[in-house]
Image: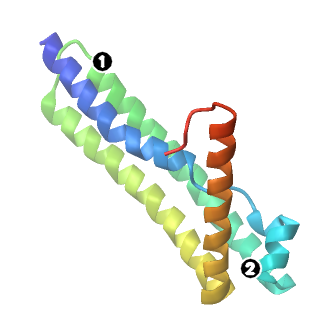
Amino acid sequence: MLRNTLWAALVVLLMVAPTLVYGQHMASGKWWRIPDVAKSLNLSDKEVQQLEEAFRHSRRRLIQLKGQVESEQFELENLMDSKSLDDDAVHKQYERLEKARSDLGTERFRFLLKVRKIVGYERFQGLVSLKKRHLRKQRRYRKQNGLTPME
């Protein structure tokens, strides 16, 4: 019985790990307020205002959805820690957790779409290039300073 529980816990951990790693590399914050970024993208005051509003709306929703993910994760952990393992309950809870994660990912994607609509194709490609350069710099810095590499 203990062996089955350990295997189930390992499977859950392996399924959760990619999501956690991906989440660590998501850009956060108001990048359009960084002077060099705003200048290189030539953002207008109206576009900055639109980005601010989209961010506020999305951020509220993301906070709620992150809380839901944490709550569902907590419930799954409780079921996994139970002395007697109820396979059906664990599977149903896992499905609720995955639904919450999916909703969170969908909201992140909605914000990305709003950004794309606000800045347009060319400047969005510029933003993608800036992000790639930033990640390369981070990796180089981490490697030079003996820090753990980013995935």
> What kind of residue is marked 2?
Gln
Position of 89 compared to 150: left or right? left
Q: Residue 113: x, y in percent?
A: 54, 77
- At x 22%, y 12%, the residue is 83
Residue 135: quarter of image? bottom right
| Callouts 2 and 1 close, C-beta under 8 Å | no
Q: Mark 1 points at which residue?
A: 81
Position of 18 compared to 88: left or right? right
Residue 50: quarter of image? bottom right
Residue 144 higher or lower than 2, as above or below: below
Q: Which of 123 and 97 is in front in this view?
A: 123
Query: Element at badge 1?
Result: helix
Q: Which of 84 and 12 is in front in this view?
A: 12
Q: Is tag 2's residue or tag 1's residue first in the polypeptide sequence?
A: 2
Q: Residue 4: x, y in percent?
A: 14, 19
> How many discs appear?
2
Q: Residue 12: x, y in percent?
A: 29, 33
- At x 28%, y 25%, the residue is 79
Position of 43 compared to 143: left or right? right
Q: Nearer the viewer, residue 149 or 48?
A: 149
Q: What's the colour scheme?
A: rainbow
Look at the image and tell me in which quarter the N terminus lies.
Answer: top left
Residue 71: quarter of image? top left
Query: Element at badge 2?
Result: helix
Q: Name the residue under label 2.
A: 50
